[in-house]
Image (cartoon, rainbow, N blue to C red):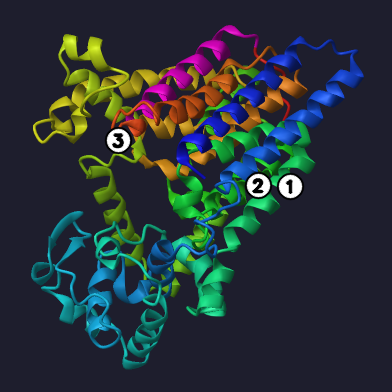
């Protein structure tokens, strides 16, 4: 489908969802028939959102549901993590290609994953002999066979070996490895692997619907499905939604008053992707404030943190044993540090990009183009974040205090679900992870529906974020949509915090 038409249809779906939220607050509680019809309409809108999420049924242009680009990184990255670590996947690929299909023969550059710089091939393969030495002959033969299969996909391999490598943690690789070994690298195996995340998503939202009700889950599903890039970047890969599944299950079990199980899922999400720790931070602050108010710990607090700790210990320890020791976690930490130091990557959302745009622009530039800039300042070579570190830190701390003050006024489920706001403030995260806002939307909808609270301005704002993105996409503003979304996420954060601070604190529903 033409992207312009697809964008308009997505805007219509978001507008319909937001209108139903407004209608819910306007319907008298006694109007049972009207409320039932509104509930059915919200489920229909969510179903349309799911259809839009799959590129209106086209998946990957009508082809098989396999993402060869992703599967290359995460199939080989998990199966051979012990040998290639987080920095040598491309080197091993070039070496094994020379003994096999030769599809990389014309490639003259690769990315140095230690620095994320694109370098000429001779420099990139300077220590390739050491990489080969880490493989036994049997493992090298396995890699050759797997590459023979993976390389059959008609891909621009020159682009793939200048990507950013495998980003799955050792804990993620531990979970992915049995599936990789089971299904293998054949075409049928890759197609089976490509279904895993979709099955996880179906299982998650079915469980959420049982836990929170169909109406609340429909709102979360809509926001989950409307986040741009997500399907095209992640669907058809290998367990790229494991962390999101774990976060959603943590929310569901917290709601069901099963804090240890909730903690266990949350612990896995943290060791799989690290940034979900901010979900634990916001809930932890809520629990601390609740303990201060009541002069006693909330029942289940120790079980929650015990579940987090035990889960993290088990997965970290088991993955270290599987992949050659705890040094694999050190190299993963180094890989994440490189990601955060990358100067500019347009397909990411963060406060840092917005702050640098404001700090490095003249007043006239801000007046003319704050929402639609001609150039993103962070991308300019003369703009160095180190020169703005103090100011950025001050803004980050102020926003963190605002978020935590608002968290104290929220219910515990909402506190757990607004972790993405802290992620936005402190980290730079790829666009395709931001469907996690679907969980935030679900918690805000639960408060609005179940607790009889006023219309959630933050929830409506989440609809505006994605709707405005699809509108902005058609305004011929260059590749600035990521910056624009970052601006709107800041506005959403402020709207949610303001309402939380001025609204009466709800009785906790969890």
Q: Residue at x 42, y 69 (%)?
A: 78
Q: Residue at x 68, y 52 (%)?
A: 202
Q: Which residue is mark 3?
A: 479
Part of the protein shown in magenta: 483-504
Of the pair 319 and 128, the residue shown nearer to us:
128
Q: Residue at x 73, y 30 (%)?
A: 42
| Residue 148 lies in the magenta stretch | no
User: Quick one: label 3 or label 1, which is nearer the N terminus?
Assistant: 1
Helix, strand or loop at label 2? It is helix
Q: Is residue 460 left or right of residue 355?
A: right
What percent of the width, then of the height, locates residue 330? 30, 59
Q: Closer to the camera: disc 3 or disc 2?
A: 3
- Disc assigned to residue 207: 1
User: Quick one: label 1 or label 2, which is nearer the N terminus?
Assistant: 1
- Residue that lies at the very extreme toward the bottom in this rendered image: 137
| Residue 484 lies in the magenta stretch | yes
What percent of the width, then of the height, locates residue 183? 56, 77
Of the pair 12 and 207, the residue shown nearer to us:
12
Q: Which residue is mark 2?
A: 249
- Tell me: residue 471, above or below residue 28: below
Q: Could you say which quadrant of the image residue 486 lies in?
A: top left
Q: Spatial distance from mark 1 to mark 2, Cα to Cα?
A: 8 Å
Within 10 Å of disc 2 (Cα), the crowding (few <14, some 14-19, many 20+) is: many
User: Quick one: label 3 or label 2, which is nearer the N terminus?
Assistant: 2
Q: Is residue 489 left or right of residue 411?
A: left
Within 10 Å of disc 1 (Cα), the crowding (few <14, some 14-19, many 20+) is: some
Q: Could you say which quadrant of the image residue 257 lies in?
A: top right
Of the pair 293 and 178, the residue shown nearer to us:
178
Q: Determine the main secondary structure of the stretch shown in magenta.
A: helix
Please state, as top left, top right, bottom left or bottom right, where the C terminus lies in the image: top right
- Report if the CB atoms under discs 1 and 2 are less than 8 Å apart: yes
What percent of the width, then of the height, locates residue 395? 30, 20
């Amino acid at each position: 489908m033409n992207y312009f038409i697809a964008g308009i249809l997505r805007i219509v779906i978001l507008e319909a969802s937001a209108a139903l939220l407004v209608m819910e607050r306007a319907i008298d509680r006694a109007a049972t028939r009207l409320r039932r019809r509104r509930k059915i309409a919200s489920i229909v809108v969510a179903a349309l959102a799911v259809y839009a999420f799959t590129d209106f049924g086209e998946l990957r242009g009508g082809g098989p549901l396999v993402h060869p680009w992703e599967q290359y990184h995460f199939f080989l990255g998990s199966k051979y993590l012990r040998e290639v670590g987080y920095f040598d996947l491309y080197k091993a690929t070039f070496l094994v290609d020379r003994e096999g299909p030769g599809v990389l023969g014309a490639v003259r550059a690769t990315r140095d994953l230690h620095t994320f710089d694109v370098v000429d091939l001779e420099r990139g393969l300077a220590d390739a002999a050491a990489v080969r030495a880490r493989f036994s002959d049997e493992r090298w033969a396995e890699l050759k066979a797997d590459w023979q299969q993976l390389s059959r996909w008609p891909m621009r391999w020159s682009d793939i070996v200048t990507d950013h490598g495998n980003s799955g943690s050792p804990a993620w690789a531990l979970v992915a490895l049995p599936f990789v070994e089971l299904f293998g690298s054949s075409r049928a195996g890759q197609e089976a692997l490509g279904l895993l995340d979709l099955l996880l998503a179906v299982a998650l939202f079915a469980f959420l619907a049982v836990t929170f009700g169909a109406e609340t889950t429909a709102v979360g599903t809509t926001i989950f499905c409307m986040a741009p890039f997500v399907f095209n970047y992640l669907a058809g890969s290998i367990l790229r939604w494991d962390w999101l599944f774990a976060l959603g299950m943590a929310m569901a079990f917290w709601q069901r008053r099963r804090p240890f199980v909730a903690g266990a899922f949350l612990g896995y999400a943290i060791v799989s992707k690290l940034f979900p720790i901010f979900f634990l931070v916001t809930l932890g602050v809520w629990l601390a404030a609740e303990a201060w108010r009541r002069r006693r710990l909330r029942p289940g607090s120790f079980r929650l943190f015990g579940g987090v700790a035990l889960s993290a210990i088990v997965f970290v320890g088991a993955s270290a044993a599987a992949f050659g020791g705890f040094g694999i976690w050190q190299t993963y930490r180094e890989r994440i540090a490189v990601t955060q130091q990358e100067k500019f990557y347009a397909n990411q959302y963060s406060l840092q990009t917005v702050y640098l745009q404001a700090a490095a622009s003249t007043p006239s530039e801000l007046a003319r183009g704050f929402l639609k800039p001609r150039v993103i300042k962070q991308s300019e070579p003369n703009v160095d974040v180190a020169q703005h570190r103090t100011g950025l830190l001050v803004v980050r701390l102020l926003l963190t205090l605002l978020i935590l003050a608002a968290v104290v006024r929220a219910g515990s489920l909402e506190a757990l679900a607004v972790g993405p706001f802290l992620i936005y403030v402190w980290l730079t995260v790829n666009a395709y992870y931001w469907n996690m806002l679907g969980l935030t939307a679900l918690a805000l909808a639960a408060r609005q529906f179940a607790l009889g609270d006023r219309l959630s301005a933050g929830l409506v704002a989440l609809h505006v974020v994605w709707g405005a993105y699809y509108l902005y996409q058609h305004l011929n503003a260059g590749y600035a949509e990521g910056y624009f979304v970052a601006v709107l996420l800041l506005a959403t954060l402020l709207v949610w915090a303001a309402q939380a601070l001025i609204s009466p604190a709800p009785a906790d529903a969890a």
